[in-house]
Image (tube, grey):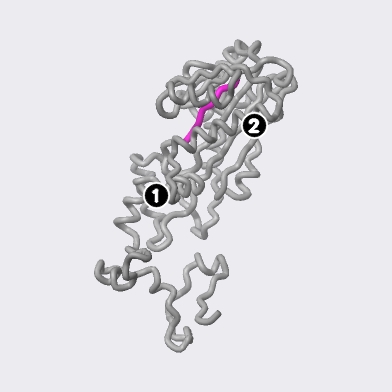
């Protein structure tokens, strides 16, 4: 599994794929869909598909694939290696959704929640398989939201394909278990080798499970909270855990809009207006400023201007 395309820029999402087995272009195939990392406040969410000929379903059972959450990291790596060795009839594809993508989607003006993002990602991966020539006849999905509605949605989107959506599908259908393993192995590797774009020095990698209720994760979030710029892009800043910590520990700033008297409104709330950070110094001379410019501006080569 080559993670280089995502590691080159982990602020955006990325698709990773195996070779398409030739037999999958000539025989009727089944495909499983599952994800890894839906709940954590740290790191990406990875959606995975795995596909093989219907005639090879029993071969997947023989590999003893299982729900990735019931396996140790070593067991998952071993099973992924077996899936890779079965590349003559097994293929896979992954969509790595960066923390930045997840958070900006959820917080944009037109709300795009995690369920909608998950559905669209799954649909995109099925379409990728079809566009690649995979002869899909059966699709099995671990549900997101009500299973009946999701099954109906996918069946309408892909007529002619038998779609089965079930809770805990990763423990019911081996092809979904295989997708779960591919997704979880990718997420584990990405999180373990995360390249921080921010200048954080020697980063403490002991951030626990990444789930919001993990004390180690909470301690890590407190340690790497910048009071002005928040969190590095490793953190899903749309998660309530991150937002609560920013509200309580970060600098309070008033965001101006057209309906309020910006700086006066900010003063009434005993905080600063965003506009106050952009005011030029008297006479356009900033030589008297003693504060050090934050790395956010220096990294981007941004400077204050008093004339255009």
159 relative to 244 in the view: left or right = right
Classify residue 271 by image quadrant. Answer: bottom left
Q: Residues within 10 Å of mark 2 (few under 14, many from 20)?
A: some
Classify residue 254 by image quadrant. Answer: bottom left
Q: Is residue 75 visible?
A: no
In the image, residue 272 lies at what x, y percent? 33, 70
Main secondary-structure element of the magenta-colored stretch: strand
Asked whether 34 falls inside the magenta stretch, the response is yes
Count of residue discs: 2
Residue 34 vertical position relative to residue 6 in the rendered view, above or below? above
Asked whether 157 falls inside the magenta stretch, the response is no
Residue 238 vertical position relative to residue 62 in the rendered view, above or below? below
For image coordinates 52% across by 58% down, the residue present is 198
Residue 121 vertical position relative to residue 171 in the rendered view, above or below? below
Q: Nearer the viewer, mark 1 or mark 2?
A: 2
In the image, residue 133 lies at what x, y percent? 71, 25
Quick one: 168 or 305, which is closer to the camera? 305
In the image, residue 65 lies at what x, y percent? 55, 19
In the image, residue 73 lies at what x, y percent? 51, 30
Magenta stretch, residue numbers: 31-37
Q: CA distance from mark 1 to mark 2?
A: 37 Å
Dot 2 falls on a residue whose secondary structure is helix
In this figure, which residue is indicated by the disc labeled 1?
Answer: 220
For image coordinates 53% across by 35% down, the residue present is 120
For image coordinates 33% across by 52% down, the residue present is 245
In this figure, which residue is indicated by the disc labeled 2?
Answer: 128
């Amino acid at each position: 599994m080559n993670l280089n395309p995502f590691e080159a820029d982990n602020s955006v999402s990325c698709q990773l794929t195996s070779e398409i087995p030739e037999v999958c272009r000539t025989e009727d195939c089944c495909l499983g869909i599952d994800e890894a990392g839906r709940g954590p406040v740290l790191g990406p969410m990875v959606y995975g598909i795995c596909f093989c000929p219907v005639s090879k379903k029993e071969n997947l059972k023989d590999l003893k694939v299982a729900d990735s959450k019931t396996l140790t990291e070593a067991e998952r790596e071993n099973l992924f290696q077996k899936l890779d060795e079965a590349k003559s009839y097994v293929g896979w594809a992954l969509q790595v959704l960066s923390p930045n993508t997840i958070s900006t989607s959820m917080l944009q003006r037109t709300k795009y929640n995690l369920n909608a993002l998950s559905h669209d990602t799954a649909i995109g991966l099925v379409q990728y398989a079809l566009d690649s020539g995979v002869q899909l006849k059966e699709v099995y999905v671990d549900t997101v939201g009500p299973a009946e509605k999701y099954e109906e949605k996918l069946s309408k989107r892909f007529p002619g394909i038998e779609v089965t959506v079930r809770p805990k599908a990763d423990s019911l259908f081996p092809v979904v278990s295989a997708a779960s393993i591919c997704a979880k192995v990718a997420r584990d590797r990405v999180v373990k080798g995360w390249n921080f774009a921010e200048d954080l020095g020697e980063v403490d990698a002991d951030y626990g499970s990444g789930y919001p209720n993990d004390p180690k994760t909470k301690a890590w979030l407190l340690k790497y909270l910048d009071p002005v710029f928040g969190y590095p892009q490793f953190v899903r800043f749309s998660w309530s855990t991150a937002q609560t910590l920013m509200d309580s520990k970060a600098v309070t700033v008033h965001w101006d809009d057209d309906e309020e008297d910006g700086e006066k409104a900010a003063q009434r709330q005993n905080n600063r207006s965003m506009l106050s950070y952009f005011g030029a110094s008297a006479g356009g001379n900033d030589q008297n400023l003693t504060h050090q410019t934050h790395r956010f501006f220096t990294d981007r080569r941004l400077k204050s201007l008093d004339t255009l």
